Amino acid sequence: MPLIRNLLQSGLARGRQERGRRGMPRLTGRSTAAGVAVTPERALQVAAVFSSVRLLAETGSMLPVGVFQRSGSIRIPSMEHPLAPLFTYQANPHLAAGEFWAQVLGWMLVRGNAAVYVERSGGGVPVGLWPIAWTSVEPRRVKTSGELVYKITLDEDEWAPIREADGLVRAENLLHFRAFGLGGAEGLSPIGMARQSVGTGWAATSYIGAFFARDASPGGIVSVPGNLNDAQWERLTRQWNELHEGFDNSHRLAVMEAGAKWEKTTLSPADAQFLEVYKLTRSEIAGIYGVPPHMIGDVERSTSWGSGIEQQSLGYVIYSLLPWLTRLERTAGRLLGDADVYLKFNPDALLRGDITQRFSAYAQARQWGWMSVNEIRAKEDEAPIEGGDDYLQPLNMVPAGSPAPAEQRALPGRQTRAEETVESPAAEDMPSWIKRHYEAISGFFAEQGEQVLAALGVRPDTPAEDLVDLVADNETLTELLLQLARGLAAEVGTSTAAALGGTFVVEETVPALAASAASTAANVNDTTVRELADTIRVADSPAEVQQSVQRMFDGMTRARAQVLAQARVATVTNFASHEGAKHAGARTKTWRVWDSNPRKTHQRADGQTVDIRGEFEIGSRRGRWPHDHRLGVDEIAGCTCRLQFNL
């Protein structure tokens, strides 16, 4: 007896464990209380399911998407990243990026999981993204290490350039997008978890359709006096069905004979509550996907998503769409390989108000100085205009305890400044800053040369474009140049503004300084790659290649670093003095030539005076200050011109 009792208790314990493990329905289950086997394909035939999936997939795939890089508190577009075209333009040669995101979202919404195979080049760089049907993917765990691998078995109508033997793909070569889950390798299927509601919706829809197919209106009971024999009963029933059964035969004239009487007893679908069941199921399915019911056609009930279209769209974006987009961004971001580089969907296109609301918001943004004219025009898909990149600053907005803004101090009637005109300093007046730039740039070139030589020591046949990590080196050089530019701009801008009796806020110039630093870094490193390609000759021996590259970087750390240092100091100095004068309230600026033998275009511009925000005409080009990139290389190289700022 103790043995039997122990066996029974252990069996009950196993039963409790199984019930605990299976407390949630299995994702592979199909049966429902309504007696309907629910599959994703059948579920999509339920209007509410299809509408919810289509709405989320299409609105998600239509949004602009970009690759960005963090640099401190700055966010810089990084569309030159090798993966940016795959995410934003063409996922693979046969699939546009928009359709790619629609497929990924569709699989997540239906199956709870989506798989994307990552095609790589010989150098390991991703060159294609190929969506794989989740039904063709089986996640597996390596027992010894816990590593997640995926067994891919493509159907006959699928194709992807899978190179792994036996279709066993490691996690780094497969992007696994998961829906909400409670642990485990797979996300939970919304349809699998809510198959009871989906099955009820299917059953209600099928019943209503079958009701109309069988409808024999006018319906009810035909009663006759006395008894009918079998032949009479069959004749009466056949005639009645032939004349009245079916939706197309509803309400035809009923001819009664032999004293037969008609009594109406059939209930309508609404009376039988099947339409109410159908409507309730539609709302439940909308809730499964977090979609506002009114956006899939259920407009009978009042909505708590806001009273206007803009408020309803905002609620949909925040509570329905953004959770799915965030999952896409985080999973796809694994490929970017840098925590500071990230993928971002822009839902602003769904949040545009009417024209009155938009223009009112633009007016406030322009008035308070955080949007320029060209930024506003870009949001309305309009071309930029000349002078549209400047920002306004309210005259009465200053930090607590600060003196009045420079623009107020520059107004007529206030105390006069020390001088009425101030000249911008020249790069030659900044020897210490030229030295700092030279040492920093020279050190960067030396470190870059060491990395290139080390790579050549491992693989002497490495092509030039693979010797320099443009993404990493651009980031490093941008940060280096930006830090130098901030210090130089703060010094020059402050001294210029002070000479005019005003103040200078360097933080307002940081975005422009960051963009200039990033552009310079990209140009410098691109030039380095081209010089490497010209320096490395296939016919040379590995030792000769090493020597040639060493000589190249030795020259870069000396002559090229010196030229770059002088150019950067000249560029930042002219920019900072111009911004300092503008902050201090200067009204106009005058071009001044300092070279004893200037170029003709600069000589003709000597004495030209324009508004402080205007541009000078220098030959066929226009620019805001000497060394402005808008003037082009021919007008910048060797230029020693200065500006005179006038109050």
Image (spheres, rainbow, N blue to C red):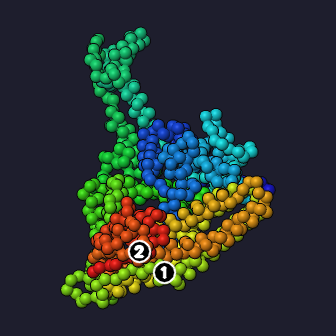
Q: 625 or 2: which is nearer to us?
A: 625
Which residue has dot 1 on it? Answer: 428
Q: Position of residue 181 (x, y in %)?
A: 57, 56
Which residue has dot 2 on it? Answer: 641
Q: Position of residue 453 (x, y in %)?
A: 72, 66
Compare marks 2 and 1 and give the one earlier in the sequence.
1
The residue drawn where x is 38% and y is 38% is 274
Find numbered disc 1 in the image and state the secondary structure of the residue it sits on.
helix
The residue under label 1 is which amino acid type?
Glu
The residue under label 2 is which amino acid type?
Cys
The residue drawn where x is 51% and y is 44% is 96
Q: Are marks 2 and 1 in contact (CB under 8 Å)?
A: no
Q: Is residue 178 above or below residue 76?
A: above
Q: Position of residue 379 (x, y in %)?
A: 35, 57
* In the image, farthest residue toward the top: 231
Q: Position of residue 157 (x, y in %)?
A: 61, 34
The residue drawn where x is 43% and y is 76% is 595
- Based on the displayed image, in which of its 4 quarters is residue 564 positioned? bottom right
Q: Is residue 435 above or below residue 347?
A: below
Find numbered disc 2 in the image and state the secondary structure of the residue it sits on.
loop
* In the image, farthest residue toward the left: 413
Residue 298 disc label: none
Q: 193 or 345: which is nearer to us?
A: 345
